[in-house]
Image (cartoon, rainbow, N blue to C red):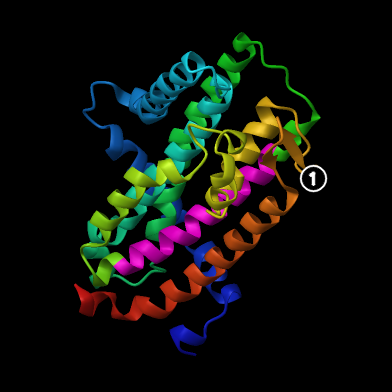
């Protein structure tokens, strides 16, 4: 059976058989990331904190202009999700080249490398989520039944990120400028996702921004956790579109297709990694 013809079941079995290696790589990635770092695990909070600061500036500007400003809790939660996505994509894209001696000399499912980078980022994100869980009640946030959407949205975020990570890690083996393209996308991508603003504040551009498959996941987190909104129910704020249920299905389809396609494409290209280097 060729790599191109191997199904998802075969790939998942290979990953399961390599779970001990995956665990070791995740542990190594986490330890190496903070070894000899003065701030230690506090670095895990830096990017969300900076994003929240930017959100506070925008919130203040909108308030002074008499416009509706986004909630601080919503900005914090979406900043946490964006920080996970950006960090996971950055480390996963470089995961093959950073471990090129393993890639070229030892046989193992190569998918383990970008996957370990994504899972290592999950450790950072868990720290941030715990802190958010402590801080949000202090902001007067009341948790309702809609928070049950949280695990669904987190799974979609993980699937979307992992699938995209496989594609970028693979592409970076063949085209070294992919990492620079990624940095440009992450730098400007935050302005094309509802991290600092809400769809209702974007006017006619809301429907365009929500075509980004990551956008409904981020906005869904805000509405479900900080707004107590059932994501199966449409929502309008002041006559402006704030949420449409089909957005969630749209992101789910993209997440599934990206994970499936990313795994298949990565496995089909893995045999040529040594040649590319």
User: From the viewer's perspective, is residue 29 above or below residue 95?
Assistant: above
| 258 or 18, nearer to the observer | 258
Tell me the residue at 23%/63% (across/down). 100
Tell me the residue at 48%/18% (across/down). 65
User: From the viewer's perspective, is residue 3 above or below residue 235?
Assistant: below
250 drawn magenta: no
Q: Residue furthest bottom?
A: 1
User: Quarter of the image holding residue 259?
Assistant: bottom right
The quarter of the picture where the C terminus appears is bottom left
| 127 or 58, nearer to the observer | 58
| 215 or 39, nearer to the observer | 215
**How crowded is the residue under tag 1: few (<14 C-alpha within 10 Å), some, or many (20+)?**
few
152 drawn magenta: yes
The residue under label 1 is 232
Q: Position of residue 48 (x, y in %)?
A: 42, 28
Q: Which residues are magenta?
A: 150-171
User: From the viewer's perspective, is residue 24 above or below residue 166?
Assistant: above
Q: Is residue 101 left or right of residue 245?
A: left
Q: How many marks?
A: 1
Q: Is residue 10 left or right of residue 276?
A: right
| Prevailing SS of the magenta stretch | helix
Tell me the residue at 68%/41% (across/down). 241
Q: Position of residue 76 (x, y in %)?
A: 51, 25
């Amino acid at each position: 059976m060729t790599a191109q013809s191997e199904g998802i079941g075969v790939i998942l079995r290979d990953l399961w058989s390599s779970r001990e290696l995956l665990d070791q790589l995740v542990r190594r990635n986490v330890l190496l990331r903070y070894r000899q770092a003065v701030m230690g695990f506090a670095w895990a909070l830096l990017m969300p904190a900076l994003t929240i600061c930017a959100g506070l500036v925008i919130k203040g500007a909108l308030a002074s202009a008499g416009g509706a400003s986004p909630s601080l809790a919503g900005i914090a939660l979406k900043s946490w999700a964006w920080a996970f996505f950006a960090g996971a994509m950055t480390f996963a894209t470089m995961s093959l080249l950073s471990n090129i001696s393993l890639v070229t000399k030892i046989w193992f499912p190569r998918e383990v490398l970008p996957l370990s980078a994504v899972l290592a980022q999950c450790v950072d994100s868990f720290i941030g989520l715990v802190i958010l869980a402590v801080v949000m009640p202090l902001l007067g946030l009341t948790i309702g039944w809609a928070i049950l959407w949280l695990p669904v949205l987190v799974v979609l975020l993980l699937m979307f990120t992992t699938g995209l990570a496989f594609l970028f890690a693979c592409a970076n083996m063949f085209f070294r400028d992919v990492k620079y393209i990624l940095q440009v996308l992450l730098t400007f991508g935050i302005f094309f996702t509802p991290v600092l603003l809400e769809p209702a504040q974007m006017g006619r551009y809301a429907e365009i921004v929500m075509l980004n498959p990551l956008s409904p996941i981020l906005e869904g987190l805000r509405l479900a956790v900080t707004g107590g909104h059932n994501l199966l129910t449409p929502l309008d704020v002041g006559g402006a579109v704030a949420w449409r249920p089909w957005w969630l299905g749209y992101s789910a389809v993209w997440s599934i297709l990206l994970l499936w396609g990313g795994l298949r494409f990565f496995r089909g290209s893995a045999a040529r990694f040594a040649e590319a280097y």
